[in-house]
């Protein structure tokens, strides 16, 4: 049996993607507002905003690039990619973003197994400040990097399965803004069944 995504299905799916796009962009805006102010650079709310950004961006990725392909999820993915003009090299499909959300518990388990010492969670105005803590040892940092945010580059750094991973939030935000424009245009089209207003 072939699954077909109807016009109604596609409208509802695009509306849901747009919800997560808007939530991700709002979280990023709040993160930038907080961390570009020297008085609130180390405010712990930065992690709420960064995790919210990652989580909602990961949900967008799950809609258009599902982790497990059933017949219906494959049809959904193909319809959304076509309807929203998402290319296979889109930063929205970056697995590091999804893994950061889904495997945080496993990374913390690895930290505990490594005797639970030297856990780094901080916002830095520049990369130079972050590099100073690791004596330039980028490949083998002296710290377990739970969360680091580099304000000037808009880059998020975290411990991955195979070492430290960097996520370029600025590039991801640019892709989200473009996706928002496409989704809003699609939903405001005269042929669209669902309208967001």
Image: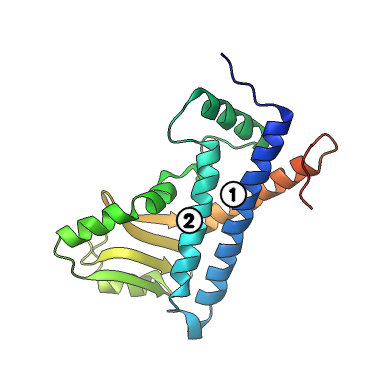
User: Marks 2 and 1, how far apart in space?
Assistant: 14 Å
Whole-percent x, y for residue 125 in the image = 44, 75
Q: In the image, is 119 to the left or to the right of 191?
A: left
Question: In terms of secondary structure, where does tag 1 sit?
Answer: helix
Whole-percent x, y for residue 101 in the image = 41, 53
Q: In the image, is 194 to the left or to the right of 169?
A: right
Whole-percent x, y for residue 30 in the image = 57, 70
Q: Is residue 83 above or below residue 18?
A: above
Residue at x 19%, y 61% (from the top left corner): 112
Q: Is residue 171 above or below residue 131?
A: above
Residue at x 27%, y 61% (from the top left corner): 138
Whole-percent x, y for residue 175 in the image = 59, 49
Question: In terms of secondary structure, where does tag 2 sit?
Answer: helix
Asked whether residue 99 is in view, the answer is: yes
Outermost residue toward the top in this view: 1
Q: Quadrant of the N terminus?
A: top right
Q: Which residue is mark 2?
A: 54
Residue at x 78%, y 45% (from the top left corner): 195
Most foreground residue, 166 or 71 = 71
Q: In the image, is 133 to the left or to the right of 25?
A: left
């Amino acid at each position: 049996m072939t699954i077909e995504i109807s016009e109604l299905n596609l409208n509802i799916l695009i509306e849901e993607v747009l919800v997560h796009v808007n939530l991700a962009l709002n979280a990023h805006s709040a993160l930038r507002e907080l961390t570009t102010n020297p008085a609130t650079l180390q405010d712990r709310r930065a992690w709420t905003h960064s995790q919210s950004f990652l989580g909602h961006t990961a949900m967008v990725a799950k809609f258009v690039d599902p982790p497990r392909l059933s017949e219906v999820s494959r049809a959904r993915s193909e319809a959304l990619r076509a309807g929203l003009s998402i290319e296979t090299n889109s930063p929205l499909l970056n697995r590091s973003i999804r893994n950061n959300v889904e495997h945080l518990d496993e990374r913390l388990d690895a930290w505990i197994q490594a005797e639970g010492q030297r856990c780094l969670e901080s916002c830095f105005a520049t990369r130079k400040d972050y590099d100073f803590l690791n004596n330039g040892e980028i490949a083998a940092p002296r710290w377990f990097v739970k969360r680091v945010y580099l304000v000037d580059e808009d880059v998020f750094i975290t411990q991955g399965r195979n070492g430290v991973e960097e996520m370029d939030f600025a590039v991801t935000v640019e892709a989200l803004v473009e996706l928002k424009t496409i989704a809003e245009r699609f939903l405001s089209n005269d042929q669209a069944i669902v309208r967001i207003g």
